[in-house]
Amino acid sequence: MKKTYIFLIPLFNFGLSFLSFSQTDTNYVLNFNFNDHQIKEVDDKIIIKPVGVSLADDRFGNKQSAIYLHGDAMSYLNLGTSNLLKPKAGTISLWVNLDRRVYTGKGYDCNPIINVKNGPGYDFNIAYCMTYDGYAKRFLSCSTKDSTKETFILSNEPTTFGKWYHLVMTYDNNFFAFYVNGSLQQKTPKGFETIFLQTDSVVIGNTANKKNDRWSEGTFDDIQIFHKALNINEVKELYEAPNPNRAKLILDNILLYAGIGGLVFLVAYFLVLNNRRKLKREEEKFKLKSKLYEMETKLIKSQMNPHFIFNSLNSIQQLYDLDEKEKAQYYMSHFSKLMRKLLENTTKDSLSLADEVDILNRYLEIESLRFNHVFNYSIKIDKEINTITTFIPHFLIQPFVENAIWHGLLPKKKGDKKLSVNFQLITKDKICCIIDDNGVGRKSKIQNFGKKSFAINFIQQRLKLMNKNLGTDFSLNIIDKTDNNGNSEGIKIVLYLPIIKNSNLE
């Protein structure tokens, strides 16, 4: 029997040594952070028992990452009786946001946060606790050996409901300290060893005391129990710990902003695409209109050229009818040169001013020969105009010159017969051509011919088409000149023409 006792003594001592080692492991920590949306210890080191507890938002706004107690006797969190919850020297850390002061219950006026007993009974039996003291209106932490030895610390500032607080209690045999939001409230000598009732549970939000039966309403989070007394810097690190979901939030924000950016890009892309389609449609419409105007202009020109040719051939025929063959041949020679010039440029929409003036000179020479030089003519060009690089619409001036000769100068019975053509630079995009005669005037023309010139109608149509195509205000003014007595002194034609940038376009 004695040998049996000798065998059990070393085994018992080994068990005590193992238990002592497990309680003095300073790296050990229990963690209840609820970040996985579950009410349990993070590493499942102990099994806890929630009663009437809900998941709620934590202090960072993370959904269902804290626990909520509803302020009655049937709402609390039982962490269990494990020795891992009851270190001889330790640190109790948690975050709490009390919604209100709970008045119901009995005994000492308080709203418990965390507590565990040191022995049986109802008085002086707190191994460690943190609570809201209803009398002082502050947070309180305390530890009791028995009725002879107790230490407690109140927070320096009154408690505000609806606000998150970080509460930390540290203790060993020598000192007891209390921190609120990383700030040391007080560190006081302790002078006794903390002992625990092995069968009692560590409870959150309930006194578990029949004499002092109280509870709390609010949100609790990040409950941690360390097997050592943390120093002030370590406590501050706990208080300043970042949002555990920060990386996820950053990723969520990146994805959110990327999504918004992508959506904005897509909207902008489709707007730009739609705008391009509209511009393309407008461009196609503009090209179609331009083509239509070009075809209409060519049609008008095709009608004007035969008109001039018919008149010239008619003049040659008259010379042959008068048996003036030599004069007719000379006239025919000049006319053929003019026709060649006209045919060379018949497909062009615009001519250089030099070519246009050359054609006018040839035409005036033919008409002068035809009518035995009965009228004088002159062509003047503004010195600022470069006749080689300045292009104007083709075949707009000649019909007015023809009109001035046939319907203004030839019907005139008395006096000199004069015709002048003057080109002036108005702007870099516009020139003015003035065709001035001292003939019988428009009134006489109407009496003689009964209607407007066929060519003038076409010129007015061409100017109208060019204004539509180029978006300009090219115009034609016909001015009747009179003397002081109201007698006609001829007509002045003022024709504003565009300077064509591209000689292939009108």
Image: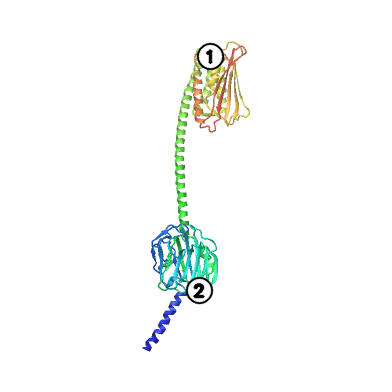
Q: For the residues marked 1 and 2, what is the alpha-carbon distance in whole angstroms?
A: 136 Å
335 sits to left or right of 52:
right
Is 170 placed above or below 412 here? below
* Mark 2 element type: strand
Q: Nearer the viewer, residue 30 or 212?
A: 212
Q: Nearer the viewer, residue 158 or 408?
A: 158
User: Residue 345 at x, y = what percent?
Assistant: 51, 28
Q: Position of residue 418 (x, y in %)?
A: 60, 17
Outermost residue to the bottom = 2
Give the quarter of the image for residue 292: top left
Circle nearer the viewer, 1 or 2: 2
Quadrant of the image for the N terminus? bottom left
Mark 2 crowd level (few <14, some 14–19, many ≥20, 10 Å Cα): few
Asked if residue 421 lies left or right of residue 215, the reply is right
Give how far across and how far down residue 265 sits, in percent: 46, 47
Nearer to the camera, 442 or 438: 442
Residue furthest toward the left?
Answer: 1
Q: Mark 1 or 2 closer to N-term?
A: 2
Residue type for callout 2: Lys
Q: Quadrant of residue 7?
A: bottom left
Q: Is residue 373 visible?
A: no
Residue 303 — which label? none
Can residue 485 be seen in the rendering of this structure? yes
Is label 1 in a helix, a strand or a loop? helix
| Mark 1 residue type | Lys
- Camera-side residue: 10 or 488? 10
Q: Which residue is mark 1?
A: 445
Residue found 50% across the figure and 74% down from its top: 149
* Count of marks placed on residues: 2
| Disc 2 target residue | 149
**Mark 1 crowdedness (10 Å alpha carbons): few <14, some 14-19, many ≥20:** some
